[in-house]
Amino acid sequence: MRFTTLSAAGALLVLTVSSSLSAQRPDSQLDPRSVELVRQARSAQAAGNLGGANDLLESALAVDPRNREAFVLIADIARAQNLPGKAIRSYGEALKLDPNDLAALRGQGEAMVAKGAMTRAKDNLAKIRTICKAGCAEATTLAATIAKGPPPTPAATPVAAATPPAGETPAKP
């Protein structure tokens, strides 16, 4: 009796999992509307309309959240707008879809350098070097960015000593 119940539950589980997996499309088949929106976003980005490009990319992801190229472009735009935190997150979303995406690894590493996370950027460089055994442009570019280091932070201007305006006497403590 126990075996019948267990085997029936196991068969039901296998049937449920297999039917849900067969309903999903392969990653290589993106929704054509999403691909078209990414193409339009590239045109808007090239024209300097970063806000419009970002809106188109968000729409592309709403149509098909598996569009890795849309995540990479959103991250590129975030870096252009000096938003390294947003760029790191967007590259991370692309890397969830394909952990071996060299452009996303390089871009994320460069954004990490901009944020000052040098150790994590070096980890990305090591991943790139593992993926492409022979020298590749992504590894060279990221290595150069790491060697340059993070951009200088604007120095805080010192607060001037509290001097009273002309004609006033300083208050005594």
Image (cartoon, rainbow, N blue to C red):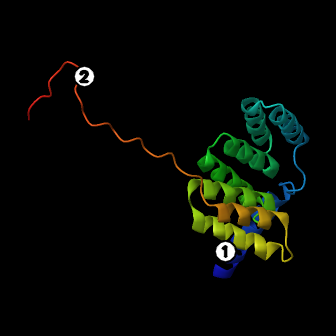
x%, y% of residue 134?
87, 76
Q: Quadrant of the C terminus?
A: top left
CA gap, disc 2 to disc 1? 90 Å
Q: Check disc 1 and give the amino acid type.
A: Thr
Closest to the observer, 92 or 45 = 45
User: Residue at (77%, 74%) from the top-left corner?
Assistant: 129
Q: Is residue 99 left or right of residue 158?
A: right
Q: Is residue 146 visible?
A: yes
Q: Which residue is mark 1?
A: 5
Per the rendering, the mark at residue 165 is: 2
Ranked by sequence position, the earlier of labels 2 and 1 is 1
Image quarter of residue 104? bottom right
Q: Check disc 2 and give the amino acid type.
A: Pro
Q: Residue furthest front?
A: 167
Q: Relative to 83, say whether 130 is above or below.
A: below
Q: Relative to 122, say whether 39 is above or below.
A: above
